[in-house]
Image (cartoon, rainbow, N blue to C red):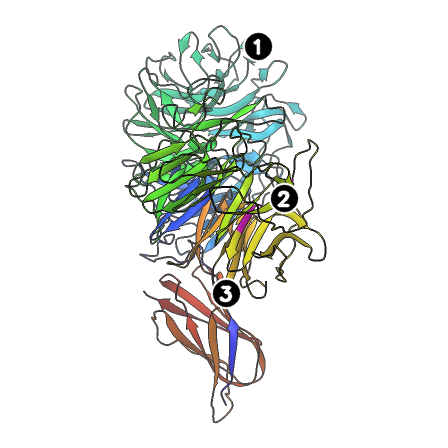
């Protein structure tokens, strides 16, 4: 007897689903390039995918930990990756383990993708062996949520760790803990309770039998200790040594401790030590606690300001004492954030950095961004000093601006910037595009096996060599649809910022730059958004009071060069949320440009341009507010947005239909809804249609809207093109209480919706054909598009991670998945002579295969059977069977077209029986 059961199988793939194996070292699938800022528009065109948004760089998705080559700056894409972690800031510090490996500490939990592709969790500290593998035998107990480790020191077989915590596992430990260096187990060693004003313990050092700790310490046990304390290394008892570091009348903050012989150097932010005035840097006798005469004043603003700067690090190297932090002067000598002292004499050397780490601006000047510039760590390699800091982006020399990101290499002999271009980029989830110009905040550096190890802020995603692995792309890029890589020889214009109103009163402005609309016709790529084409270099902005920026441009499709540009008004409101160009539809007769651009009377939401002459036609839709989306069906132009009137006075709420004829404006008697109109406290409309997609006789719409009446719908609906009535199609998915879907895209059988996650729904039934595609961090996808040629789904937005149900991965802003379409698969019960005696899962045949294979199994009695395919990370990618089966032998034909080559596993569960086998897809 043969029985056939048709199953609907969902298949979904992240760019990181499959991995190639080479000497047990994993790679992300083809190492796709990702941007460092939000994506707002996507346009597939043949083998190219044009992507627009608020980004400035594309590169490999590495995350907050990376290994950069000391010579080239290339990031090692074969290394393990920290895929997500939890904590206050990020990964903080490295220390060597004395055996060629290292420890790294940071947030209270981080998850690491190992070289075999498996994901492992670590509690705040991880040990890496000398060969780069992770020591799985070392893992401390859990820290409390939102606490972290700040620093560490290794003493024989004990790892002392300090930070902002009061409990490690079940053990109470205030800001310092002793761990077994092999296992991470908490040791009995402990101190009396430590009281800090804030921030926990920042610094730790050891000499002889004494452990020194620094922070904004106030008390240890019942004893007053300001800024720094000394503990017995064996017992943890507080020692009498007590220099008393203060700021004003309270405890000073000690960030750094360095020991040289009998001298203890401390740095931080303080104005006195003991009874002596000391500005953020001091020298203390290790034995007596006496304050020594060495007295360099570290200040900000001016030499005589008396305002202490901040010293965050002290490092001794080649008989020199280096300090770093946030300061401007040492005594009367200008030293910007880094200074060097002769260790034997204590004198400030003539060596200084021939740059400034801050690049400042005026309110209506030429540059829109100023970096923080604080220096957090230094690492030494030959004649190079690597500098890590907070949002390091550029350095200003006497003659030029040199851009470096996150880490800067300096010449140790003369302080000049070297040509090393390892880049660590800030991940901008904000939206306007400002922060995507910045380097990431890097906390820790370590030289290891010819590489520079980097520990960075949790918002770090992209890392690699600038110009080689990391490419600058200014709000617009072209991606190879076959590889996921940026096309190197296609570079768009030097878009600049515009200034937009950022408050209800219209008196506050912010810089904004993003591409939010793309379209192609013939050999022309049309680009729109909130952009300008003046102002000098890419970090400049246009003054809105005197200039109408070109927010819509036509580019040569092959070269990216400008062919034509249009200014559609000078008044933009980021506060309003619907500024700039949102949608473009080019036709041989007219180019329809939709958005929110006031200043064109009667055309504020929709402009029509003659494609031959470039003239803006006198075609006025008279809409009362901005337009979010448009679509054309036959001779009808459908318009959706925030408006409530068309032709100035005729009621049309959120949607309207016009004839596409250009000799006159014809508003059709087509209406849908009725829509409920919502307002905020300022009287602005808060409900609207965000996007539309037209399919035959149906328009699918999304947005923060409510349709009332007999065919009530919220946030998702489909309506007929010919009469505006709501169809019977209803999505069978949970209602989004506090968000909505921003974008909709269609294939032959599926409706894709993008918002806080991504849904794939059947056009026929409205039911899910896949699990929800989840996003992490700022969980918003703003645009979704499909590519029929490659059967890809492209998702862009403000998300900074993707989520597989267990872990977040550092894939920001732009991801690619294959179609989640229905696939008909046959499960066949084969004839048998006798009932099977055992549970058996057979090896698939053929194996390796491309793209189809057969899986057979036997069960001796009736069972609930599950047959599932997993990727190499153990994540489910295809569920073949989930139901009741009688005793017998069954075969399942599997079609994995659309999946990448790689190793997969299939698992049979039948009652208490479980079996797993491996198979190989090779294309």
Please state which of the two labelled residues, at mark 2 or mark 3, is closer to the viewer.
2
Magenta region: 685-692
Against 868, residue 143 (above or below) is above
Question: Residue 9 — which label?
Answer: none
Residue at figure coordinates x 39%, y 21% from the top left = 322
Separation of marks 1 and 3 at Cα, in angstroms: 72 Å
In magenta stretch: residue 807: no
Question: Residue 275 — which label?
Answer: 1
Image location of residue 302, percent across then percent down: 47, 8
Q: Mark 3: which secondary structure? A: loop
Q: Where does label 2 land, which residue?
A: 652
Q: Position of 696 compared to 350: left or right?
A: right
Neighbour tally class for label 2: few under 14, some 14-19, many 20 plus, Cα within 10 Å: many
Tell which of 860 and 295 is nearer to you: 860
In magenta stretch: residue 687: yes
Against 318, residue 828 (above or below) is below
């Amino acid at each position: 007897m043969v029985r056939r059961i048709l199953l609907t199988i969902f298949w979904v793939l992240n760019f990181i689903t499959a991995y190639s194996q080479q000497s047990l070292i994993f790679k992300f699938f083809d190492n796709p390039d990702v941007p460092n800022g939000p994506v707002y528009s996507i346009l597939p065109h043949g083998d190219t995918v044009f992507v627009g948004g608020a980004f400035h760089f594309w590169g490999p998705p590495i995350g907050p930990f990376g290994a950069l080559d000391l010579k080239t700056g290339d990031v090692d894409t074969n290394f393990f990756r920290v895929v997500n972690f939890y904590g206050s800031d990020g990964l903080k510090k490295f220390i060597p383990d004395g055996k060629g490996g290292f420890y790294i500490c940071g947030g209270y939990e981080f998850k690491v993708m190992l070289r075999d592709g498996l994901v492992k969790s670590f509690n705040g500290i991880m040990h890496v062996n000398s060969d780069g593998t992770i020591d799985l035998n070392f893992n401390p107990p859990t820290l409390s949520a939102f606490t972290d480790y700040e620093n560490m020191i290794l003493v024989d077989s004990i790892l002392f760790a300090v930070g902002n915590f009061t409990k490690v596992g079940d053990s109470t430990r205030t800001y310092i803990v002793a761990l077994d260096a092999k296992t991470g187990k908490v040791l009995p060693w402990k101190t009396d309770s430590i009281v800090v004003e804030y921030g926990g313990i920042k610094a730790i050092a050891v000499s002889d039998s004494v452990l020194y700790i620094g922070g904004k310490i106030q008390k240890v046990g019942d004893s007053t200790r300001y800024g720094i304390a000394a503990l017995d290394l064996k017992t943890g008892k507080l020692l009498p040594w007590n220099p008393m570091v203060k700021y004003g009348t309270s405890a000073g903050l000690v960030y750094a401790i360095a020991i040289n012989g009998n001298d203890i150097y401390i740095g931080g932010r303080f104005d006195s030590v003991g009874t002596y005035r000391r500005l953020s840097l001091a020298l203390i006798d290790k034995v007596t606690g006496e304050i020594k005469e060495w007295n360099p004043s570290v200040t900000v603003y001016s030499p005589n300001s008396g305002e202490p700067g901040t010293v965050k690090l002290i490092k001794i190297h080649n008989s020199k004492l280096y300090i770093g932090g946030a300061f401007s002067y040492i005594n009367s000598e200008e030293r910007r954030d880094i200074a060097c002292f002769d260790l034997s004499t204590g004198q400030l050397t003539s060596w200084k950095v021939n740059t400034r780490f801050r690049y400042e601006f005026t309110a209506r000047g030429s540059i829109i961004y100023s970096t923080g510039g604080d220096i957090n760590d230094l690492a030494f390699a030959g004649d190079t000093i690597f500098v890590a800091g907070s949002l390091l982006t550029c350095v200003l020399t006497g003659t030029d601006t040199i851009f470096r990101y996150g880490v800067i290499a300096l010449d140790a002999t003369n302080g000049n910037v070297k040509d090393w271009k390892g880049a660590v980029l800030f991940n901008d989830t904000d939206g306007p595009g400002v922060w995507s110009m910045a380097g990431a905040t890097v906390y820790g550096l370590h030289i290891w096996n010819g590489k520079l190890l980097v520990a960075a802020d949790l918002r770090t995603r992209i890392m690699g060599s600038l110009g080689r692995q990391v490419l600058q792309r200014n709000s617009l890029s072209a991606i190879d649809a076959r590889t996921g890589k940026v096309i190197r020889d296609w570079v768009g214009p030097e878009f600049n910022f515009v200034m937009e109103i950022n408050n209800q009163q219209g008196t506050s402005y912010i810089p904004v730059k993003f591409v939010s609309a793309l379209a192609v016709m013939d050999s022309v790529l049309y680009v729109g958004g909130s952009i300008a084409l003046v102002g000098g270099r890419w970090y400049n902005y246009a003054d809105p009071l005197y200039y109408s920026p070109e927010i819509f441009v036509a580019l040569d499709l092959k070269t990216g060069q400008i062919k034509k540009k249009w200014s559609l008004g000078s008044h933009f409101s980021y506060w309003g949320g619907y500024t700039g160009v949102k949608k473009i539809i080019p036709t041989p007769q007219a180019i329809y440009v939709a958005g929110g651009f006031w200043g064109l009377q009667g055309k504020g939401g929709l402009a029509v341009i003659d494609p031959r002459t470039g003239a803006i036609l006198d075609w006025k839709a008279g809409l009362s507010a901005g337009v979010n989306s448009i679509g054309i069906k036959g001779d009808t132009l459908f318009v959706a947005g925030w408006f409530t009137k068309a032709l100035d006075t005729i009621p049309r709420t959120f949607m309207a239909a016009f004839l596409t004829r250009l000799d006159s404006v014809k508003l059709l008697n087509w209406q849908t809804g009725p829509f409920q109109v919502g307002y905020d406290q300022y009287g602005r409309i808060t409900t609207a249609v965000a996007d539309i997609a037209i399919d035959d006789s149906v328009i699918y719409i999304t947005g923060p809207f409510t349709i009332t009446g007999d065919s009530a719908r919220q946030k998702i609906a489909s309506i007929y093109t010919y009469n505006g009535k709501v169809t019977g199609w209803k999505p069978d998915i949970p209602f989004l209480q506090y968000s909505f879907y921003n974008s909709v895209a269609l294939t032959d059988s599926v409706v894709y919706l993008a918002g806080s996650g991504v849904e794939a729904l059947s056009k026929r039934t409205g039911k899910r054909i896949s699990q929800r595609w989840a996003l992490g961090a700022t969980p918003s996808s703003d645009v979704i598009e499909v590519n029929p040629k490659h059967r890809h789904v492209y998702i862009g937005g403000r998300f900074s991670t993707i989520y597989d149900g267990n872990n977040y991965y550092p894939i920001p802003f732009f991801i690619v998945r294959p179609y989640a379409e229905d696939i008909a698969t046959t499960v066949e019960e084969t004839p048998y002579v006798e009932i099977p005696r055992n549970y058996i899962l057979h090896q698939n045949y053929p194996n390796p295969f491309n793209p189809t294979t057969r899986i057979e199994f036997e069960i001796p009695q009736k069972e609930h059977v599950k047959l599932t395919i997993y990727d190499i990370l153990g994540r489910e990618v295809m569920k073949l069977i989930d139901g009741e089966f009688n005793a017998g032998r069954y075969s399942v034909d599997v079609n994995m077209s659309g999946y990448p080559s790689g190793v997969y596993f299939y698992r049979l569960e039948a009652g208490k029986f479980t079996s797993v086998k491996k198979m190989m897809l090779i294309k």
